[in-house]
Amino acid sequence: MGSARLVGVTVETSDAGRANSRPPPPRGTVTFGVVWRACRPLQWIKNALLLAAPLAAGVITHGAVMRNVAVAVVAFCLVSSATYLLNDVRDREQDRVHPRKRLRPIASGALPVRVALAIAVGLAGGGLAVAALVRPALAAVCGGYLLLMTVYSLWLRRVIVADILVIATGFVLRAAAGGIAAHVRLSTWFLVVTSCGAIFIVAGKRHAEWLGVARAGVTRATLSRYSAAVLGAIIAATAIAASVAYAVWAFGRPEHGPWYEVSIAPVVLWFYRYGVLVGRGAGEAPEELILRDWRLLALTAAWTALFVGGTYVGR
């Protein structure tokens, strides 16, 4: 029986436990299903942020805008999957001792590293080409996203605070890409809400990882330099900042009826509910948490109805 010390927590391990934590050996031919799982399609939900600016501007129903934004979403699905593959290649040794991540195709050996990198290059090139069909500026944003995430995977992930800010910037770039695709100018308050909301989600993810290091048996290099208090402070501060910024934006919108003003309530409650779940140790996979918690889904639906009402009915 041995022990491993992680962020002040001692975890007892055994030789059998270590053996059982190892993934199964490669099974041979790479299938489409394996590649599909490696591309993490569930995380494409993040690309819904591209709809935010055209929705807020009330132009999403315009034929050309709808087409351009749809193409932009496809482009970001391609380039984001390329970065996921690169990140999984980089993390494969750590993932192999993680109780859940060890089942990922690259960590398990189902998708060889060379094949994964080749697919990543193809997805990146395809995403940039698709983005260029809409606007060269959109391709530039996709290229910036690819460069930023590559630098993150290779270096910035080990730099405290920067590891949070870089991932949050990826969310902001998605929102900016939607504005570029729709020819919509992004307001200052829109960018503040998006930036604070993104930092809130990423800090929540780090908090869940920090709490789960004893279960995982492995941790990010930066986690030992964070604390629950610091991450909790970031989560609380960004939730408050995003809520206040959204309220300022909502009260400044021209519309008939209090659609936007009333929509502040589900926004604040959404941040509160998510923060409660993060405090319980959830949030390591934000997209799964949002899709599986019925309260978050209900608040999202309520906000969407009010927001759409203010944009298309209240004007």
Image: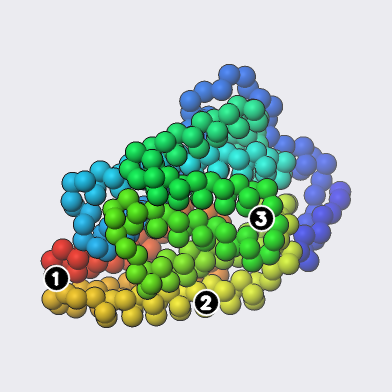
Q: Nearer the viewer, residue 48 or 125?
A: 125
Crowd band around label 2 with a 10 angstrom C-alpha radius: few (<14), some (14–19), many (20+):
some
Q: Which circle, 3 or 2, is nearer the viewer?
A: 3
Q: On the rendered structure, is 56 left or right of 28?
A: left
Earlier-in-chain disc, 1 versus 3: 3
Rendering coords of residue 127 (x, y %): 44, 38
Quadrant in which residue 95 is drawn: top right
Residues under labels 2 and 1: Cα distance?
32 Å
Q: Which circle, 2 or 1, is nearer the viewer?
A: 1
Q: Nearer the viewer, residue 57 or 85?
A: 57
Residue 314, numbered circle: 1
Q: Is residue 281 visible?
A: no
Residue tagged by mark 3?
157
Relative to 292, say whether 92 is above or below: above
Relative to 155, say whether 160 is above or below: below
- Disc 2, disc 1: CB below 8 Å? no
For the C terminus, the quadrant is bottom left
Measuring 40% from the left and 49% from the top, which residue is drawn there? 137
In this figure, which colouring scheme has been used for the structure?
A: rainbow
Residue 236, numbered circle: 2
Q: Secondary structure at mark 2?
A: helix
Residues under labels 1 and 3: Cα distance?
44 Å
Measuring 78% from the left and 57% from the top, which residue is drawn there? 11
- Disc 1, disc 3: CB below 8 Å? no
Measuring 39% from the left and 80% from the top, which residue is drawn there? 244
- Disc 3, disc 2: CB below 8 Å? no
Q: Is residue 184 visible?
A: yes
